[in-house]
Image (spheres, rainbow, N blue to C red):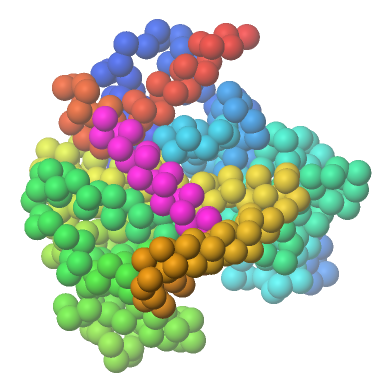
Amino acid sequence: MADHHNGLSFLESVDHMVDRALLSMDLAPDVAEAIKACNAVIQVKFPVKIRGKVQIFSGWRAVHSTHRLPAKGGIRFAPCVDQNEVEALAALMTYKCAIVDVPFGGSKGGLMIDPRQYDRDEMQLITRRFTLELVRKGFLNPATNVPAPDMGTGQREMAWMADTYKHLNPDDINYTACVTGKPVEHGGIQGRTEATGRGLQYALQEFFRHPDEVKAAGMEPDLAGKRVVVQGFGNVGYHAAKFLQEENDCRIIGVIDRHGMLHNAAGIDVEVAYRYRVEHRSFKDFAGGEYTENGAKGLESECDILIPAALEGQISADNAARIQARLIIEAANGPVTFEADQILNKRGVVIIPDAYANAGGVIVSYFEWIRNLSHIRFGRMQRRFDEVRGHYQIEALESLTGKVLPQALKDKIDAGASELDLVRSGLDDSMRQAFQGILEVRNGNEKITDLRTAAYVTAIRKIARSYLDVGIY
Ligand code: GLU
């Protein structure tokens, strides 16, 4: 990945950002070093017989921090995965969890594979074999290390992983908590699939609740009507674009995928474009916009908000000066390199950083893990009780006032929250609180001018606190 980062590896790029944050803090250098260090990383190589021939697969799992357990983070399946990338992503998970107050350490895994080259049965065989390696070596366990979906993995892979763990540990009563992002029928939670995109929407909504921030970015108030370009139309990019269009009246003017860019100044119908792409595997010949093959150039299109939701290192020293967006919100992990970050900061482009912006996934993973440990769906014991209480409140109000409440209001008062309602409420609250925490840190330290540095300082303070409280040993 070094080429994307203009000489800096992904891990170095993350470390530089952390070092920049440390410059504005008064932290003992040894504590800083302890926080930055990757605690453990394993590489596994294992054979799987595919179509009569033995193939060797390479995978990694890095545990960046264990100041809180379990260590948490996704597993990606991609042809370009390597140890440096996995370590960088594991470090990001540590800071991410701290920023949004999710009590986990940071971890990340990767398998070097192009999933498009294998059918479902083959993928199952490979995933189960990889899981076996991770479980046997202590890198997958509900108490210490809990994977989740990432690029190239989803509910399907999580179900296979959980099932493999269960067969190896039939006496572990908490086996479903060994991975998150599972299908709902297999211990998953409502709203996990949409969670990262949903969290991104909540982050933007919160940003627009702070008029000074919006003004500093050189934008008019109000999220409605903003022109948005999304790079990457996988789970995260699709959901973010969909929610921003349907619920915030944003105009999605560009969608970039690995083949090219779909552009329409009047706005793209996200749902229709998404279905077209599923069917045709590209936006080519889609009637709802103009298609060009140069997707990279699309990042430089005129727009208000740019959402990089694909790979790391997409905005580098090569193109940072040409980015026209006023606000970048990082849906991917590490889409802006350290050098690009400096260029964009100088140009006054505001960046809502990855470690905060895309934390929705791990926040809802946290809810899923708790659900698994408590062995009960959120709201199961409370929902009908709340409905009945709401009903009595309506009766009391009506009999005291002698008036009949409008039906729409009654429906709101006597509705008990479903699991999805509770997940969204918890996610929204976490995103709001975290953003306010980041602003507080930035506003309280004149050395900090950008949100990323403020986010890292927030994280480092919390992690340092926990190290200092219990001592480093
Ligand atoms: N892979 C996601 C991320 O990068 C989710 C991790 C998790 O839920 O543990 O944040």
Please, is residue 466 above or below residue 80 in the view? Answer: above
Q: Does the segment drawn in magenta span residue 424?
A: yes
On the picture, is 282 further left or further right than 304?
right
Query: In the image, residue 228 lies at what x, y percent?
Result: 23, 66
Q: Nearer the viewer, residue 298 or 415?
A: 415
* Front residue (pair 449, 258): 449
State whether residue 233 appears in this view: no
Could you tell me which residue is drawn at 52 percent across and 18 percent down?
A: 466
Residue 260 or 264: which is nearer the viewer? 264
In the image, taking residue 47 as reference, residue 448 lies left or right, namely left
Q: Main secondary structure of the magenta part?
A: helix
Can you say which quadrant of the picture contains the C terminus? Answer: top right
**Is 435 included in the stretch rendered in magenta?**
yes
Residue 339 position (above or below residue 300) = above
Residue 220, picture quadrant:
bottom left
Residue 5 lies in what quarter of the image? Answer: top left
**Count of marks placed on residues:** 0
In the drawing, does residue 332 fall left or right of residue 349? Answer: right
Across and down, in percent, residue 29 comes to 40, 10
x, y (%) of residue 123? 71, 65
Q: Residue at x 88, y 52 (%)?
A: 167
What is the magenta range? 421-440
Residue 36 is situated, as x and y percent measured from the top left of the image, at: 47, 23
Query: Is residue 403 or residue 240 the one in the foreground?
Result: 403
Up/down of 349 relative to 197, above or below: above
Q: Residue at x 46, y 9 (%)?
A: 30
Q: Residue at x 18, y 31 (%)?
A: 449
Specify whether 140 is left or right of 207.
right
Q: Is residue 176 something one can see in this rendering?
A: yes
